[in-house]
Every structure is written in structure tokens, then in C-alpha cells.
Image (cartoon, helix red, strand yellow):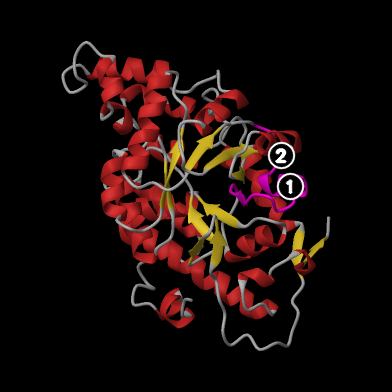
């Protein structure tokens, strides 16, 4: 349980140095980062309509407070897969964090570990998974798997994640191909072509065995091989069943928007679903994740956890997603902007701000625990 007085930015000595709002964090990040990296981080597919739709979807759900109630004590903890966590949000997998700050995933991991908030590490990270695990220590960390175009390499990634203490494998299924991103085209910027996000590949024995020379000696060949192996357009549900036979870790699938796919996920024995449209980065004109969430929950009916990302910006967004059925939400772009602005301290402040906002919102709507948040809180006004 958090003490709002300790976490609220208005009581912090850093109130004048750190932003309060998501928009301010984004603006500061834009001032700091070069156009190419910033455009890659902030951008979405095509006209970026999906990104805008993700945000708009929250507007049409309005919260109905139930007061007065004694809300002097509030509990933000959640239980998922048999474990208790301090907040109803985790840190989403975001690749290439070295683009935002030289500390990359290590800075994010240090901040997450201090608050014991789970961090999901992307396959295409700027630091190897083992280095990030060392920073996380005993704090919960999950591994997001972009299934490469080589079975032995995939198994190697999973084995390494198991050995390093990652407790869940999150298979992202909504990235069969690089998307059309107009910002990257305008900026003539493709980080994968210059070898960004390769740390888990170049540190992997299977990947290194595919090269005639080590990547330290021939980086160009390593980049070429990496781009042959990622992304993978061949992935099917049969592959998920194959993975089930090769790991004892819980498996979640990330990128579900269609109720039919939720049913298939259940049939293939996954341990959780993450409703996501990749933050609007893959398909222009796609359904908002929040719009898909109730449909997916209606299929799942509580049999496995349902998480959600894409569009979470504020504490009220978290409350609305939980009320619509999410067990936990994943925070994405806000913490990356924090990383860009102030490294570990920026990530920490973004998380503290969100915790304080969730806590304040719960008090002001008459709820004392996450378990009390349900659909009766909401009204559809469109």
C-alpha cells in the first residue's frame, strides 16, 4: 500500500524540475532527442489514426462516483498468476530503449525494481536480458518474445530468459512485418538498419554460430542476419503450442484484438492475454485496444488473466480499463518519455505520478481497493 503524501509530485522536492502531465513529458523528450529517434518512439503506423483512436476511446467512458464512503485507507495491490503486485500497472515491453537514453533498459529496470513494479523486457532491447535481470534482482521481470525466424534461436532466447530469472514469457503476435511509418520515412531513419536493438541477438550463442565472424568484427553481417530473422511472418497458433512443450513458464500472448483469436488462445492453453494494438504502431485505422477489451473479456470469462495496453496515459485511464475487465494494464510511452528526459529518475517520477493519480482517483470515486473497481463505475456517453 502506497502513501499518497509520499508519492504525490506536488509534495516532491523535484516539482519544478519534472513535468506533471504526459504531454509535458513528451514535449521535453522532443526537445532532448534527435528527430530520428524521437520520431521512432512517438510515431505510429500510417496516418497514426490508431494512436488517436486509442486516446479517444477513453473519452466516451465516463466515471460515476459513489460517495460518501470512508476512503481514508486505499489499497492499489493486485494479484496475478498467484503473485501479489503493488500497483495495477506494469511496464510494457518497449524495444530499443537506448534510443531514448544511454542507460536504456538498465535505467528503466532500476526504477521498476525500486518500486517492485514488473518490467517486461523486449527481445529487441539495447542491453542483453542477463544484464537487465541483474539490475532487477528479485523484482519481478518478464521476457517479451519476438519469435525469430529460427527455431533454435527462439529456444535459446527462452532458455536464457528462464536461467536469468524471468518469470513469464510474453509472445507478441501482432508484428509479422515492419509497418508503414511515415515519420521514419520523412526522417530517413530505420534503427534496425544501423544495428539498434540487437543486444539479445549478438549476445546469443546460436546467433553468433550463424556468423562467419563475431559481430564485434563484422557488424554489417550481423545486422544483415538480424534483419533476416526479425520479424517473423510465419508465426501461427501451432507455434504457441510448440512453445508450451518447451517451457514451464507461464505464456501470455500480446496483441489480441479479435474475440475469435481470444478463443484460439484459450484452446492453445495460454496463461494470459494482453489486449493490444501495439500502441497504434502496426496498423493504421485499427480498433482501439480499449474498444476490444470488453469483447475479449466476454470470451475469456475470467478463466485466464486479461491485461491491456495502448492508450494508457493517466490514472483515470487505468481505472476505466480495470472497470472494463482488465486485470492489469501496461504503461508504455509515458515511461519512455521519462527515460528520455531524466533516465532512471524520469521513469521513477512517471511511475510515482501515475500511482498518486490512481490513488487520488480511487478516493474521489469512492473505491478503497482495486478489487472494488467494476463496470458499475462507468457510463457510455457517445
> Does the image show residue 382?
yes
Q: Is residue 117 above or below residue 358?
A: above
x 37%, y 41%: residue: 162
Q: Nearer the viewer, residue 117 or 279?
A: 117
| Kind of element beneath mark 1 | helix
Mark 1 Cα shell of 10 Å, populated few (<14), some (14-19), many (≥20)? some
The verdict on residue 290 being magenta is yes
Q: Is residue 18 above or below residue 137?
A: below
Alpha carbon of mark 2 to alpha carbon of mark 1: how far?
Answer: 7 Å
Q: Are marks 2 and 1 in contact (CB under 8 Å)?
A: yes
| Kind of element beneath mark 2 | loop
The quarter of the picture where residue 221 lies is: top left
x 66%, y 36%: residue: 265
* Residue 16, horizontal then vertical, whole percent: 37, 72
The verdict on residue 162 being magenta is no
Q: Nearer the viewer, residue 183 or 223?
A: 223
* Residue 37, horizontal then vertical, whole percent: 38, 37
x 69%, y 68%: residue: 373
Mark 2 Cα shell of 10 Å, populated few (<14), some (14-19), many (≥20)? many
> Does the image show residue 101?
no
Give the magenta range.
284-310
* Residue 305, horizontal then vertical, whole percent: 62, 51
The number of numbered badges drawn on the structure is: 2
Q: Which mark is residue 331?
A: none
* Residue 190, horizontal then vertical, whole percent: 40, 26
- Residue position for label 2: 287
- Residue 311 relative to residue 250: left or right: right
x 34%, y 53%: residue: 109
- Residue position for label 1: 291
Amino acid at each position: 500500500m502506497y502513501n499518497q503524501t509520499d508519492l504525490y509530485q506536488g509534495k516532491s522536492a523535484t516539482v519544478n524540475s519534472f513535468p506533471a502531465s504526459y504531454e509535458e513529458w513528451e514535449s521535453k523528450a522532443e526537445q532532448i532527442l534527435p528527430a530520428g529517434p524521437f520520431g521512432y518512439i512517438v510515431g505510429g503506423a500510417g496516418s497514426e489514426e490508431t494512436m488517436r483512436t486509442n486516446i479517444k476511446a477513453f473519452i466516451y467512458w465516463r466515471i460515476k462516483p459513489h460517495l460518501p464512503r470512508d476512503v481514508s485507507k486505499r489499497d492499489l495491490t493486485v494479484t496475478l498468476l498467484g503473485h501479489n503486485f503493488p500497483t495495477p500497472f506494469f511496464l510494457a515491453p518497449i524495444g530499443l530503449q537506448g534510443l531514448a537514453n544511454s542507460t536504456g533498459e538498465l535505467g528503466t529496470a532500476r526504477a521498476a525494481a525500486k518500486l517492485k513494479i514488473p518490467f517486461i523486457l523486449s527481445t529487441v532491447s539495447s542491453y542483453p536480458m542477463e544484464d537487465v535481470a541483474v539490475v532487477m534482482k528479485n523484482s519481478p521481470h518478464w521476457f517479451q518474445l519476438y519469435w525469430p525466424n529460427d527455431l533454435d534461436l527462439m529456444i535459446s532466447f527462452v532458455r536464457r530468459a528462464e536461467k536469468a530469472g524471468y518469470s513469464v514469457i510474453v509472445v507478441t503476435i501482432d508484428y509479422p512485418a515492419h509497418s508503414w511509418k511515415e515519420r521514419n520515412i520523412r526522417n530517413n531513419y530505420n534503427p534496425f538498419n544501423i544495428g539498434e536493438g540487437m543486444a539479445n541477438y549478438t549476445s546469443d550463442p546460436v546467433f553468433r554460430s550463424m556468423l562467419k565472424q563475431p559481430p564485434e568484427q563484422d557488424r554489417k553481417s550481423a545486422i544483415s542476419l538480424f534483419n533476416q530473422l526479425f520479424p517473423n511472418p510465419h508465426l501461427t497458433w501451432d507455434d504457441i503450442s510448440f512453445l508450451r512443450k518447451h517451457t514451464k513458464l507461464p505464456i501470455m500472448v500480446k496483441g489480441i484484438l479479435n474475440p475469435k483469436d481470444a478463443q484460439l488462445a484459450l484452446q492453445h492453453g495460454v496463461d494470459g492475454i494482453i489486449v493490444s494494438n501495439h500502441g497504434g504502431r502496426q496498423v493504421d485505422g485499427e480498433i482501439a485496444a480499449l474498444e476490444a477489451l470488453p469483447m475479449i473479456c466476454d470470451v475469456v470469462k475470467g478463466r485466464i488473466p486479461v491485461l491491456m495496453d495502448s492508450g494508457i496515459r493517466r490514472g483515470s485511464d487505468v481505472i476505466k480499463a480495470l472497470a472494463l475487465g482488465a486485470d492489469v494494464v501496461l504503461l508504455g510511452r509515458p515511461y519512455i518519455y521519462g527515460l528520455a528526459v531524466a533516465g532512471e529518475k524520469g521513469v521513477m517520477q512517471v511511475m510515482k505520478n501515475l500511482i498518486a493519480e490512481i490513488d487520488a482517483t480511487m478516493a474521489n470515486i469512492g473505491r478503497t481497493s482495486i478489487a472494488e473497481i467494476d463496470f458499475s463505475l462507468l457510463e457510455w456517453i457517445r
